[in-house]
Amino acid sequence: MQEILGLYANIGNITWQMVIMWVIGAVLIWLGIVKKMEPTLLVPMGFGAILVNLPLSGAVTQGTEVGALDLLFQSGISNELFLLLLFIGIGAMCDFTPLLANPKMMLFGAAAQFGIFFTISLASLLRFSIQDAACIGIIGAADGPTSIFVGNYYGTRYIGAIIVAAYSYMALVPIIQPPVIRLITTKKERMIRMPYCASRVSRRAKIIFPIIVTVIAGIIAPKSVSLIGFLMFGNLVRECGVLDSLSDTAQNVLSNLVTLLLGLTVASQMRAEDFLSLQTLMIIGLGLVAFIFDTVGGILFAKLMNLFTPHNKVNPMIGAAGISAFPMSARVINQMAMDEDPTNIILMQAVGANVSGQIASVLAGGMILSLIAR
Amino acid sequence: MNTFLFSLKVMGIGLIGIFSVTVVLIIAMVILTRLFPVSAEKQDEESK
């Protein structure tokens, strides 16, 4: 009898903090399955959050016994392996043709990184260290792997909250951006038409583009070269035309495999003792600020451009597509333009700004790594 | 307060840095599409 009761002794180790983490895990799974918000990441993360918060969970390190998820974290995230592999997949998925056809869209990608830097300042005012503030601000990159990369570089203890915020807000772009856009643009501005010249781009240009981006970004922001290099390598594999099989693997099998492991592994950082704190709530709030001010930065920059080019105005909503959440943001912007005028289609311009956000967010990460010491 | 002031410096330099790289990339893209237009590629393919 004593032995049978002993089997259930671990129940006594359950704490209320663990129960809250189970609820958070269940909410993440629910958001992924029912609301279809980034399910590839939120479902494994939600499950992982429950897994690591079981009493004496063997999935995480207990005393001298190394847990499987901690081992995966050390061998996949601490050394950046998963993230770089994921970047190859993302690069292989990106089609930069709309950007090459209309290079000035790149400016919106740059402007829409404003929220990152605004949030770093705000977080530093809230007494976070400059390194932690940088990790929080990078949530505004709207790019999960970049957020993890920067968070991991500075070894922040808030990595779990930062990743949850980054991926949740990426999925919430269709809810976050429209009210912000409506608040700072007029109906007349939202109805501005942007004629699209479907200028085609040669295959050679598309092949050379990723190499040039890597070289330029590598020279100017050398710390970002592994991020941008792997992203552009993936794109080169896609565009070269002789590695279709590798491109297909990178876009599907590799990305899926890494995402699967990434979600579970990241959850190892969601232990109740680290996750349940006032700072986590502040990080969730600051992440939202970062996304909002990214949107504001992009739109205000577009409005500024319109002051100088009154005869060739851009629809300021395009500026909001400069965030890295691809292709969600481009779709949202196009839908908003069509809501105002069903014949006004600005999808290709929005896609151009959106893919430029992919490059700019990685550059922003590189800039932060260069400017803020570990 | 020092951290905040430093963060403002990071904001200034960071944004200028991103825009400067962006301008260089735009120039590179314009040169690239001029050097390798679609028409030249078609001619090459036809001559083969």
Image: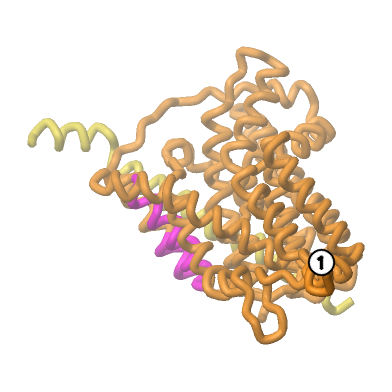
- Percent across and percent down for residue A25 are 76, 52
What residue would you read off at disc 1? A8
Which chain is tinted orange? A
Q: Is residue A220 visible?
A: yes
Q: In which quarter of the image is residue B6?
A: bottom right
Q: In this view, does A90 lie to the left or right of A318?
A: left
Q: Is the magenta stretch mostly helix, strand or loop?
A: helix
* Chain B rendering hue: yellow
Which chain letter goes with mark 1?
A
Q: Give the range drawn in magenta.
A: A214-238
Q: Is residue B19 left or right of residue A2?
A: left
Compared with A249, A87 (above or below) is below
Q: Can residue B19 be seen in this view?
A: no
Residue nearest the observer in this picture, A363 or A246: A246
- Percent across and percent down for residue A295 are 73, 43
At x 72%, y 35%, the residue is A35
Q: In which quarter of the image is residue A299?
A: top right
